[in-house]
């Protein structure tokens, strides 16, 4: 087995190359399917934070002045390289996060959608023009880059979530400092190397590895203009409050407790498949995972039967072995998720399938917890109210559509939700009635395509601007209005009065 002394240390990426850390601080990086430390990651100190931001600041001045045509050429090159070599990235993600290879490839493809959206930045940055708004005066608007922007991303999507932000930020003329999760940092370094190969100038894309010290350093650094964050709600709130207090614009995407409302007329086969896919994909470590099925009676028993029959056929194990679901990211997280099963029993719920009994196709030391199904979960239970972020699917029974909607709307979170029904009127009504930012109609994970914007309501989102799409372009640019008059021989005269349109 590799000893601690011989483990590779994942470095920072500053000024277009690997930047070995001198802080003396590192953290363990695990292979979750094996349960062993495979490498270590550098944790930045203040000097390294300052070096990263200084490099990005220097690069942003030249990059922001480069023509859109030249910037987009780099974006197109990056897109082609990513498409050709995404298999390499998927293997890195699986080795550090644990999700199965097909899921890793899926997240890369969704991130690539944003790269492709950013390839059209010339169109997205077009301003407006009004001629002759006053005699001889025209007004037009432009969008200009902010400078240095920080992206702080979570462990569950080490490629896709950063890609929600950095393609648009870079295409718009900014320099990006990415702080990936210390749990699975290698994907960020791979992406940085790909940017260099695509021709991105040194310093435009920086990777700063670290923990809370790095996060706080970016949130308070005077040369960082904006922060994009995805993570749990308590940390999202902290990021928002800290960064805005230091004069930065912020989009902080928080946690979720996503519900699937199932009406009695729903197609049970479609619904059961969707519940399995959305509840247990990526071991439930998704902010858009369905964690609560709200069953309008009398559909619950039949739906549970359909779900459990499918759960019996799931293969849990090492993501490199063609399994359906992999391990959780760390032992500590696995144990925390498993503890909710005990909470459910204490609160009087019925554990239909207990994931602690799983027999995985993988090393016994891996961080395994199988898919878990819990019926009759009280809405007062922590199993219902808290974000579990694991493969635990709760069933809550209600008597009517109205009761189900009221239940969902009463929740603290408002990230994603779905309704399963064959009633078009009910589906349309649900889209209007529900107080949630992203809604699926017979679609269990309603993550919008890159041309639209991602983000929830209530405690799932802090800040006014969502991720990617038109909202993302607005976030990474500042709007300027220019009022123009070209003098001609007819002008003249002094007028000290307030300017008026005439």
Image: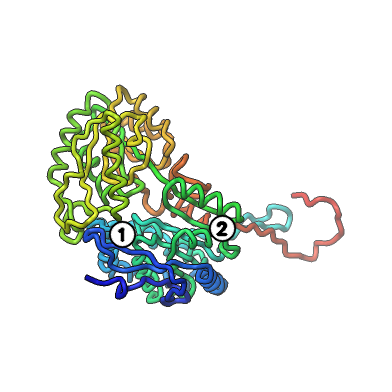
Image: 483 above or below 26: above
- Residue at 47% of width from left, 53% of height from top? 470
Asked whether 412 or 173 is in front, the reply is 412
Q: Residues within 10 Å of mark 1 (few under 14, many from 20)?
A: some
Residue 46 placement (x, y as % from top left)? 53, 68
Residue 54 placement (x, y as % from top left)? 55, 72
Q: CA distance from mark 1 to mark 2?
A: 30 Å
Quadrant (top left, top right, bottom left, bottom right) of the N terminus: bottom left
Label located before the other in sequence (1 or 2): 1
Image: 91 above or below 161: below
Look at the numbered disc 2 and give the secondary structure of its residue.
loop
Look at the numbered disc 1 and give the secondary structure of its residue.
helix
Which residue does the numbered mark 1 point to in the structure image? 109
- Residue at 37% of width from left, 70% of height from top? 189
Which of the numbered marks, if any, corresponds to residue 127?
2
Q: Is residue 388 left or right of residue 367?
A: right
Tell me the mark number nearer the camera, choosing from 1 and 2. 1
- Residue at 86% of width from left, 59% of height from top? 493
Can residue 316 be seen in the rendering of this structure? Answer: yes
Q: Residues within 10 Å of mark 2 (few under 14, many from 20)?
A: few
Asked whether 229 or 175 is in front, the reply is 229
Q: How is the image coloured?
A: rainbow
């Amino acid at each position: 087995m590799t000893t601690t002394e011989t483990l590779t240390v994942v470095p920072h990426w500053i000024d277009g190359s690997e930047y070995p850390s001198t802080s003396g601080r590192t953290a363990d990086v695990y292979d979750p399917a094996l349960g062993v430390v495979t490498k270590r990651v550098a944790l930045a100190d203040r000097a390294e934070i300052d070096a990263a931001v200084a490099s990005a600041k220097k690069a942003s001045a030249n990059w922001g002045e480069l023509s859109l045509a030249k910037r987009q050429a780099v974006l197109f090159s990056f897109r082609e390289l990513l498409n050709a070599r995404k298999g390499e990235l998927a293997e890195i993600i699986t080795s550090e996060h644990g999700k199965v290879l097909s899921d890793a490839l899926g997240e890369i493809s969704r991130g690539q959608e944003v790269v492709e959206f950013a390839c059209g930045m010339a169109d997205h940055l077009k301003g407006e023009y009004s001629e002759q708004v006053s005699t001889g005066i025209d007004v037009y608007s432009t969008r200009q880059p902010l400078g240095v922007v920080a992206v702080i991303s979570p462990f569950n999507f080490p490629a896709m979530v950063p890609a929600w932000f950095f393609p648009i930020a870079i295409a718009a003329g900014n320099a990006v400092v990415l702080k990936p999760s210390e749990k699975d940092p290698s994907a960020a370094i791979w992406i940085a190397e790909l940017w260099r190969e695509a021709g991105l100038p040194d310093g435009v894309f920086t990777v700063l590895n670290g923990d809370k010290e790095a996060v706080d350093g970016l949130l308070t650094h005077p040369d960082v203009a904006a922060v994009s964050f995805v993570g749990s709600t308590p940390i999202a709130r902290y990021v928002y409050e800290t960064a805005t207090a230091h004069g930065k614009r912020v989009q902080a995407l928080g946690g979720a407790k996503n519900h699937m409302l199932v009406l009695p007329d729903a197609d049970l086969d479609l619904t059961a498949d969707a519940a399995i896919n959305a509840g247990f994909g990526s071991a439930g470590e998704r902010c858009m995972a369905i964690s609560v099925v709200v069953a309008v009676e009398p559909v619950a028993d039949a739906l549970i039967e359909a779900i459990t029959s499918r759960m019996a056929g799931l293969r849990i194990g090492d993501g490199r072995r063609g399994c359906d679901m992999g391990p959780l990211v760390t032992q500590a997280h696995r144990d925390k998720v498993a503890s909710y099963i005990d909470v459910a029993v204490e609160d009087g719920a019925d554990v239909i399938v207990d994931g602690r009994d799983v027999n995985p196709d993988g090393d016994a030391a891996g961080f395994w917890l199988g898919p878990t199904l819990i019926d009759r979960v009280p809405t007062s239970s922590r199993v219902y109210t808290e974000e579990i972020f694991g493969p635990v699917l709760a069933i809550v029974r209600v008597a009517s559509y109205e009761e189900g909607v009221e239940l969902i709307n009463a929740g603290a979170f408002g990230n994603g939700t779905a309704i399963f029904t064959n009633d078009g009127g009910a589906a349309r009504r649900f889209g209007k009635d529900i107080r949630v930012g992203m809604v699926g109609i017979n679609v269990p994970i309603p993550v919008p395509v890159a041309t639209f914007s991602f983000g929830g309501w209530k405690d799932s989102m802090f800040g006014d601007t969502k991720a990617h799409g038109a909202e993302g372009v607005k976030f990474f640019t500042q709007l300027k209005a220019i009022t123009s008059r070209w003098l001609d021989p007819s002008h003249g005269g002094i007028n000290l009065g307030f300017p008026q349109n005439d």
